Amino acid sequence: MSSTSGTASRQRSRLLLTAGVAASVLLTACGGGDSGGGDAAGQRNENLTFATGGTGGVYYPYGGGMANVLSKDLPGVVVTVQETNASVDNMKLLQSDQAQMALGLGDVVSDAANGEHDFSDGALDICSLGNLYNNFVHVFSTTSAGVTSIEQMKGKRVAVGAPGSASEVTADRILEAAGLDPQKDIERSQLGVAETVDALKDGTIDAGFWSGGLPTGAIVDLASTGELVLIDTGQYADAMAKKYGDFYFAADIPAGTYEGQKKASPNVVSPNILVVRTDMDESLQQDITKTIFENKDALIQVHPAAKELDPKTAGEVDFIKTCPGAQAYFDSVK
């Protein structure tokens, strides 16, 4: 896996105030700066880095939408989006205080909060601002490659996700559940979703893994070629949950999510969590949470995954402590 420093040197921080993402948020975001934080809000001078993911996935554009809403509606707060390799890197950026907010998939967030696997050196001082939406594992190939099951990947060229991503963690666990050694039984590549799609188009790999919201832009692009094959993984969810935790379960990618997809595809699912450092001021925790969940309509225009925002259930995360400021907001809307 890549180190945090290696990741940081490759990545671009930006405010994402360009393109349609920002425009749609700035035109439609509701609220007028009443953050509910009282005097503390009026005295803020906060510049927050928000660790998201790669440009071909959901974290980066959705994170950009949240960053713009927060920067617009919270006086004295500016949120800068950072492109990353996603969940594992994001937790390490929080640990080093190179980021103050991050998106992370349930399995990686649980590992970080409990000091397991990639974080066996010790649990991180992090807490949750809520469960935002579910990530669906996409295991995909092309009609020309001919891979239609996990078991058929033995000896094949497979992209398991970018280094330091939750996609890579989940891919390895699915391969193991299917009886394959993820290090020995495949010709392994570590690519982000956009690079995986390009490699499939070029014929340089046979299949790829990606964990993301619905729909994922890069996979939409592949589907438009008429070549997309979605491979089911839902049958492995129970074994993964038993071994690793209840943050794994099965659900369908509905038919029609991608062009040419004629039937539902059952796959492994895990929740996406908005994570911050525990030393963030509680009033700021509360205001960030309130602003995101109360700008649901604006965020839906950025990405459909925002349809899943629900403050009545977002605090129900068993594997990481909910931040006290976020909990105060969730309690206020129940």
Image: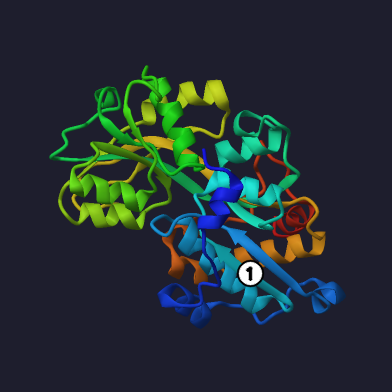
Residue 265 sits in quarter:
top left
Could you say where residue 32 lies in the image, as x and y percent from the top left? 66, 82
Q: Residue at x 56, y 36 (%)?
A: 107
Residue nearest the observer in this picture, 245 or 195: 195
Q: Residue at x 43, y 44 (%)?
A: 162
Residue 288 makes an appearance in the image: yes
Residue nearest the observer in this picture, 264 or 245: 245
Could you say where residue 192 lies in the image, as x and y percent from the top left? 39, 48
Could you say where residue 47 lies in the image, as x and y percent from the top left? 70, 70
Q: Looking at the image, is 237 positioned above or below residue 98? A: above
Residue nearest the observer in this picture, 318 or 41: 41
Q: How many marks?
A: 1
- Is 76 situated left or right of 269 in this image? right
Residue 160 sits in quarter:
top left
Report the coloring of the rendering: rainbow
Q: Looking at the image, is 221 positioned above or below residue 233? A: below
Q: Looking at the image, is 251 positioned above or below residue 298? A: above
Q: Amino acid at mark 1?
A: Val
Quadrant where the C terminus sits is: bottom right
Residue 273 makes an appearance in the image: no
- Is 276 situated left or right of 162 in this image? right
User: Dot 1 surroundings within 10 Å: few (below 14), some, or many (20 or more)?
Assistant: many
Q: Residue at x 13, y 39 (%)?
A: 144
Residue nearest the observer in this picture, 124 or 63: 124
Toward the left, the furthest residue is 144
Q: Looking at the image, is 37 positioned above or below residue 96? A: below
**SS class, disc 1:** strand
Question: Which residue is disc 1 drawn over?
Answer: 79
Could you say where residue 229 lies in the image, as x and y percent from the top left? 22, 41
- Is 8 situated left or right of 204 in this image? right
